[in-house]
Amino acid sequence: MAAESAQTLERGLRLLRLLADGRGGRTPTELSAELSLSRPVVYRLLTTLLNEGFVRRDGEGRVHLGFGLLVLAQAVQPLLRAAALPTLRRLAEQVGATAHLTVAEGDDGLAVAVVEPSWTDMHVAYREGSRHPLAKGAAGRAILALREGRGDYFVSEGQLQEGARGVAAPVTGLPWLEASVGVVTFGPLEESTGPRVVEAAAELAAALG
């Protein structure tokens, strides 16, 4: 019984990860094919996940992630912030710019952790909880690159705030997290900033993995 329960849980988690890949909803038939499971098994999984609010079905019968997952996400954010702060603090001090961790919420990026440098005369005040479209700014573009399987760093200027420059890199290797680490400043950035941001993103991925 324990082995059967563990197998059911593993299948349910695989189904949720599949729906979280950014490619949109699937029909039960598509889920069955992609998971290599029979349709009756998929329907049993969906019934449980629907009842718990972890998935939902649209008017065309396609299955999407459900809003019940937001409760879990809200509980994880403080843990994620605490894990990111040491890395962001080192990055902010090295670069002399405000460092931040941004996570994806649908088509938006949400700043869940921000650290300002201690030694600069002036720096960007970036509020935790700030939200912006992923298509704007280095942080969001890095997350979009992550969805395409790329690990590049991105540079932006004036897209979210006039005169502000940003550099961000995706946090790779964590299937459960779509996020980027970045810095933002009003001043010039050294050429080493991009590689340092990439290193910080890799450091955070290792800490969370």
Image (cartoon, rainbow, N blue to C red):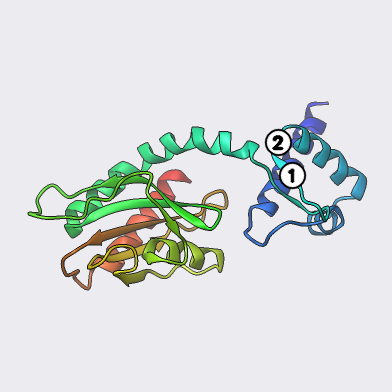
Q: To which quarter of the image does residue 50 belong? A: top right
Position of 137 relative to 74 (above/below):
below
- The quadrant of the picture occupied by the N terminus is top right
Q: Which residue is mark 2?
A: 53
Task: From the top left corner, tell me how far across and down residue 185 is, in percent.
Answer: 21, 61
Q: Which residue is mark 1?
A: 56
Q: Using residue 115 as the reference point, say whether residue 7 is left or right of it.
A: right
Q: Looking at the picture, which amino acid does disc 2 mark?
A: Gly
Element class at badge 2: loop
Residue at image location 31% in from the left, 42% down from the top: 85
- Dot 1 crowding, Cα within 10 Å, few <14, some 14–19, many 20+: many
Task: From the top left corner, tell me how far across and down residue 125 is, in percent.
Answer: 22, 50
Residue at image location 69% in from the left, 59% down from the top: 24
Q: Looking at the picture, which amino acid does disc 1 mark?
A: Arg
Front residue of 151/113: it is 113
Element class at badge 1: strand
Give the farthest residue toward the top: 1
* Badge number at residue 153: none
Position of 28 relative to 7 (above/below):
below
Q: Using residue 130 as the reference point, say whether residue 125 is left or right of it.
A: left
Disc 1, disc 2: CB below 8 Å? yes
Task: From the top left corner, tell me how far across and down residue 113 is, in percent.
Answer: 34, 44
Residue at image location 48% in from the left, 46% down from the top: 209
Residue at image location 79% in from the left, 59% down from the top: 34
Q: Using residue 193 as the reference point, say whether residue 112 is left or right of it.
A: right
C-alpha distance separating marks 1 and 2 = 7 Å
Total numbered labels: 2
Task: From the top left corner, tell me how far across and down residue 136 is, in percent.
Answer: 41, 66
